[in-house]
């Protein structure tokens, strides 16, 4: 049971040092699979239909469909790796170690009620922080959408860690939102790449002069 | 109950059907018809609120009674305007043009259909009585509106849509973490996140988790509402979207996010921690007004200026709610006024943009002569948005100012007056320069569907300036009671 959080923490740490999009997508897919298994393993002795549905849909959406979609996007746009992130890969790793220590410290300090799985909560916090960190430290739009997925995975794990029972409908709705959100992001990356011939987020210049200054006045 | 479900499902279903209707005229008429039916049903639901069991996830309370008809009415106005707009700026105008202009639009059926789905998600977020479901609905509004922002598929709108989607999704994700932490504060054995259950057990909530939940939800939903310093995406999204969409984003969608904040403030108040939330709301409110007024001052793009003005007015809503009492009454009235005024201004801006094809104010002079009706509406909107009498916003802003001075919060009052003056100077400078002067385009007859809906909004704004009817005050004070923690 404890092996899943450990694997997830290590894989999240690994995300910080990989520039190849294919690798990052693979790791995020693996996280989706393990996170889908987590509620199943956590309540093995009192399995219910809603837990099974939730686990399965999590595995299918986050572990299979979204990663495949992302692979399609990088195949069609020909983007391979984020070569010049804002924070270098060498510096990202120590930052990750610090964030992990901070997550553990925060989890202990926050004084969770008894019955909370501190390991899972630490992992959840760590994934949330890394999601936010990747969001601001990477330059490619598609990396940002993957970072969003990591953040969402972290929040999902938080929900499991504190064992809050949210009705199945709401859980599935949240999952659907994440799915549609990442789907739209993939679609947008595709359009952005066509319009800008690149997808580095600081290169999406919004200038009124460029777009409007030359247009004829009627 | 069925009525409330219809309010959510009707626009969603018709929206999906609209995707597949290829006859333009039929689809546009269906759009207006659906909006009208939705408005009629919303009024029915607001006047005779259907009884729902208290454990239900959807319901209509005193806050929804104000938000729902307002959203539905503005959507109806936008649909009348918008069906003319899509006819004037059609989709699929042949091969891709080289220049980045207004051409190359997404096909119109997708636009209309997504608009209706957007209405469905907004209705759902207003009618949600379960915090998880409300979160889901608010995130769904982001997802439904992002494709609308890049209806004009040019670089600017794509980049704006990207920024909107990423920043709001992250913001709202943080709000979800807040909801989970609130779940930790529930008394033992309780797992229910419906508003009525939470309010009735508010005194048993663990105050520490409630505080954390409030902060995360304020930051999360505040991102979506456009409170500074999380407002970064708003000026771009609201100015790059096509005008009917901008009108809905500013006039209706921001309110839905505000409702998310009001829900958790309801809990704060019921748990006896109203002051904690109010102080933060005052802080974020003042900051937003200040940041917006500075950006309004140096603005060259008129749609962007309207977007910053939305940040300013969202700040005023947060500030008024933070003041509480009379201030909160003013804030809810202000919410109505601002929605009407901003919708009319963005629609008017749409007319101007259709004619001049530029968003730079410096390229436009003599609106009063070149487009007399639109020019007049533009001027009326200016008076509205800077809170000048006799228009409605004056009354609501004055109410909030009176509340602040009666509490003797002179520092807050001083800052507010300073920021409002700055914003006034910036807006007067732009609006008046656009209105007066020599026109450089020929006078052309203005489109009826482009001005009549806006006129209706001006009349409402004017009427609210002279007289706020008793029933409206009653509805507003009922809503304020909820914010102040009264259990439904």
Image: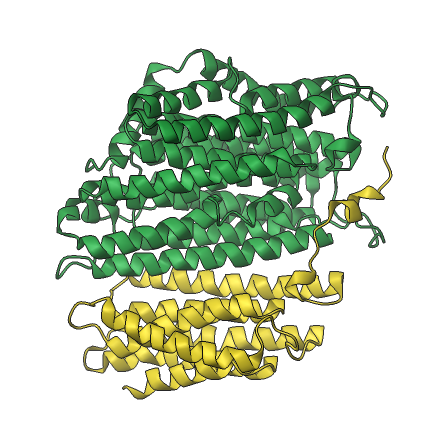
Chain colours: A yellow, B green
Quadrant of res A45: bottom left
Residue situated furthest bottom in the rendering: A3
Quadrant of res B450: top right
Location of residue A25 with respect to B488 vertically, above or below: below
The structure residue drawn at horizontal position 35% and vertical position 36%, both measured from the top left corner, is B64
Front residue of this view, candidates A70 and B183: B183
Q: Quadrant for the N terminus of chain A, please.
A: bottom left
Residue B1 can be seen in this image: no
- On screen, residue A57 versus residue A107, left or right, reads right
Total numbered badges shown on the rendered structure: 0
The structure residue drawn at horizontal position 51% and vertical position 62%, both measured from the top left corner, is A180
Front residue of this view, candidates B108 and B226: B226
- On screen, residue B393 versus residue B186, left or right, reads right
Front residue of this view, candidates B310 and B75: B310
Image coordinates of residue B2 in percent, x first then y, are: 33, 42
Q: Quadrant for the C terminus of chain A, please.
A: top right
Image coordinates of residue B310 in percent, x first then y, are: 53, 36
Front residue of this view, candidates B421 and B8: B421
Image coordinates of residue B379 in percent, x first then y, are: 64, 20
The structure residue drawn at horizontal position 54% and vertical position 38%, both measured from the top left corner, is B292
Residue A151 can be seen in this image: yes
- On screen, residue A156 versus residue B446, left or right, reads left
Location of residue B266 with respect to B410 vertically, above or below: below
- On screen, residue A187 versus residue B264, left or right, reads right
Image coordinates of residue B446 in percent, x first then y, are: 75, 22
Location of residue A137 with respect to B390 vertically, above or below: below
The structure residue drawn at horizontal position 25% and vertical position 76%, both measured from the top left corner, is A118
């Amino acid at each position: 049971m404890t092996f899943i959080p450990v694997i997830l923490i290590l894989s999240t740490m690994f995300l910080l040092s990989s520039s190849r999009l294919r690798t990052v997508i693979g790791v995020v897919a693996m996280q989706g699979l393990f996170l889908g298994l987590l509620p199943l393993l956590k309540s093995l002795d009192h399995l219910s239909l809603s837990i099974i549905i939730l686990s399965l849909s999590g595995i299918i959406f986050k572990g299979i469909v979204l990663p495949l979609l992302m692979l399609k996007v990088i195949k069609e746009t020909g983007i391979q790796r984020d070569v010049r992130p804002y924070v270098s890969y060498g510096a990202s790793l120590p930052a990750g170690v610090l964030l992990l220590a901070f997550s553990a410290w925060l989890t202990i300090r926050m004084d969770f009620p008894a019955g909370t799985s501190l390991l899972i909560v630490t992992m959840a916090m760590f994934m949330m922080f890394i999601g936010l960190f990747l969001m601001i430290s990477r330059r490619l739009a598609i990396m940002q959408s993957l970072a969003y997925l990591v953040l969402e995975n972290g929040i999902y794990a938080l929900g499991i860690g504190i064992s809050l029972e949210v009705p199945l409908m709401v859980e599935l709705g949240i999952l659907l939102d994440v799915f549609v959100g990442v789907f739209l992001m993939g679609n947008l990356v595709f359009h952005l790449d066509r319009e800008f011939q690149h997808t580095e987020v600081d290169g999406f210049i919004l200038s009124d002069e460029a777009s409007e200054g030359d247009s004829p006045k009627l | 109950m069925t009525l409330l479900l219809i309010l959510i499902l009707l626009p969603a279903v018709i929206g999906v059907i609209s995707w597949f209707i290829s006859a333009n005229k039929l689809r546009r008429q269906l759009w207006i018809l659906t909006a009208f039916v939705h408005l009629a049903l919303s009024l029915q639901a607001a006047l005779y609120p259907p009884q729902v069991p208290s454990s239900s996830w959807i319901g209509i309370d005193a806050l929804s009674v104000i938000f729902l008809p307002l959203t539905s009415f503005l959507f109806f106005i936008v649909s009348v305007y918008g069906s003319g707009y899509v006819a004037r700026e059609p989709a699929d105008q042949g091969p891709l043009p080289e220049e980045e202009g207004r051409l190359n639009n997404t096909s119109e059926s997708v636009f209309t259909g997504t608009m209706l789905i957007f209405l469905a998600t907004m209705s759902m977020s207003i009618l949600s009585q379960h915090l998880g479901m409300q979160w889901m609905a608010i995130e769904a509004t982001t997802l439904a509106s992002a494709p609308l922002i890049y209806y004009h598929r040019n670089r600017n709108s794509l980049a704006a849509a990207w920024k909107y989607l990423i920043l709001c999704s992250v913001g709202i994700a943080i709000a979800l973490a807040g909801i989970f932490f609130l779940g930790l504060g529930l008394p033992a054995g309780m797992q229910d996140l419906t508003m009525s259950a939470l309010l009735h057990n508010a005194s048993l909530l663990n105050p520490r988790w409630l505080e954390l939940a409030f902060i995360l939800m304020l930051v999360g939903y505040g991102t979506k509402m456009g409170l500074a310093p999380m407002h970064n995406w708003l000026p771009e999204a609201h100015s790059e979207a096509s005008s009917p969409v901008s009108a809905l984003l500013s006039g209706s969608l921001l309110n839905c996010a505000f409702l998310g904040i009001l829900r958790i403030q309801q809990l704060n108040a019921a748990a006896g921690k109203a002051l904690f939330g109010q102080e933060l709301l005052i802080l974020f409110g003042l900051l937003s007004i200040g940041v917006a007024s500075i950006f309004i001052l140096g603005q060259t793009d008129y749609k962007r200026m309207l977007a910053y003005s939305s940040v300013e007015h969202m700040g005023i809503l947060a500030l008024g709610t933070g003041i509480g009492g009379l201030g909160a009454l003013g804030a809810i009235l202000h919410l109505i006024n601002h929605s009407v005024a901003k919708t009319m201004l963005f629609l008017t801006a749409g007319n101007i943009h259709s004619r001049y094809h530029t968003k730079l104010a410096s390229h436009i002079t003599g609106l009063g002569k070149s487009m007399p009706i639109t020019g007049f509406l533009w001027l009326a909107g200016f008076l509205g948005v800077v809170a000048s009498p006799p228009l409605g916003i004056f009354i609501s802003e004055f109410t909030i100012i009176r509340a602040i001075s009666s509490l003797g919060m002179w520092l807050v009052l001083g800052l507010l007056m300073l920021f409002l003056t700055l914003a006034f100077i910036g807006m007067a400078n732009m609006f008046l320069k656009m209105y007066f002067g020599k026109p450089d385009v020929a006078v052309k007859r203005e489109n009826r569907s482009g001005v009549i809906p806006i006129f209706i909004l001006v009349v409402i704004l004017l009427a609210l300036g002279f007289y706020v009817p008793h029933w409206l005050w009653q509805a507003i004070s009922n809503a304020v009671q909820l914010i102040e923690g009264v259990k439904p």
